[in-house]
Amino acid sequence: ETGVTQTPRHLVMGMTNKKSLKCEQHLGHNAMYWYKQSAKKPLELMFVYNFKEQTENNSVPSRFSPECPNSSHLFLHLHTLQPEDSALYLCASSPSRGTLYNEQFFGPGTRLTVL
Amino acid sequence: QKEVEQDPGPLSVPEGAIVSLNCTYSNSAFQYFMWYRQYSRKGPELLMYTYSSGNKEDGRFTAQVDKSSKYISLFIRDSQPSDSATYLCANPPDPTGNQFYFGTGTSLTVIP
């Protein structure tokens, strides 16, 4: 596997379910991100991890819980979601802060549908 | 006020046309500008970046920044069906930081 991978690619869940999204990067990067992409809206940054430490939490509801066990893996734990949480969830990674410019490499996303 | 504004389209052009995609931004501190391309069922990928006013060319693609009007553009010459994708502009207020401001993306279809 190369680049940034995400599993599952599609997920349908009920409002009372608990599920997790997984992201893995094979680029040796130290920063990882979760974004939410909804139709007709800008990409919304949810969480940022730098060297496994969470550095950004953009007022995300507590029903979304991130976990970063190491610099290569990132999880997004989901529980008691709402239908408006249906969206494409993108994971990204970048080398780290302090590089000349901070290109982010994205995974293919998980298409989440909440019934 | 949104940090970055972009017309979502959709935009449909015939093959070979010149395409102009545009964004406006509100924060004059932005100095670094990026264009990402997102194909259907894929994540965005960096297409071009520029760190100053003026033009930057890469093959059929030209990125243009006008800081006086806070306007950034992406031009595609001799457009091809393979250019059909969503194009997102992005501005990191701090180019070495983690926070990016993305536009909504413009959906482009190039018709053979």
Image (spheres, helix red, strand yellow):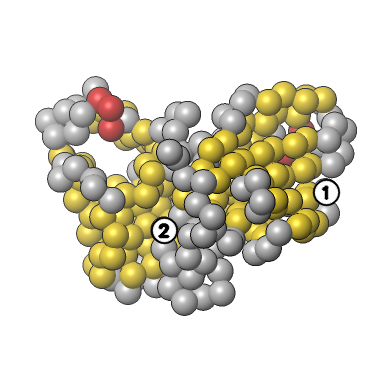
Q: Is residue B81 left or right of residue A65?
A: right
Which residue is at 50% across, 52% downward?
Answer: B27
Whether residue A24 is visible to the viewer of this picture, yes or no, is no
- Residue A26 in percent (x, y) is at 46, 67
Nearest the eye: A54 or A29? A54
> Where does the N terminus of chain B fall, quadrant-wise?
top left
Q: CA distance from mark 1 to mark 2?
A: 29 Å
Q: Quadrant of residue B105?
A: top right
First of labels 1, 2 by sequence position = 1
Q: Residue furthest front?
A: B68
Q: Report the residue marked by disc 1.
A: B60
Marks counted in the figure total 2
Residue receiving disc 2: B99
Which structural element holds mark 2?
Answer: loop
Q: Residue furthest bottom?
A: A98
Tag 2 subunit: B
Q: Residues within 10 Å of mark 2 (few under 14, many from 20)?
A: some
Question: Quarter-wise, where is residue A56 in the image?
Answer: bottom left
Instruction: Classify residue B24 as left or right of residue A5.
Output: right
Residue B7 visible? The answer is yes
Coordinates of residue B56 in the picture (x, y in percent)? 77, 58
Q: Amino acid at mark 2?
A: Gln
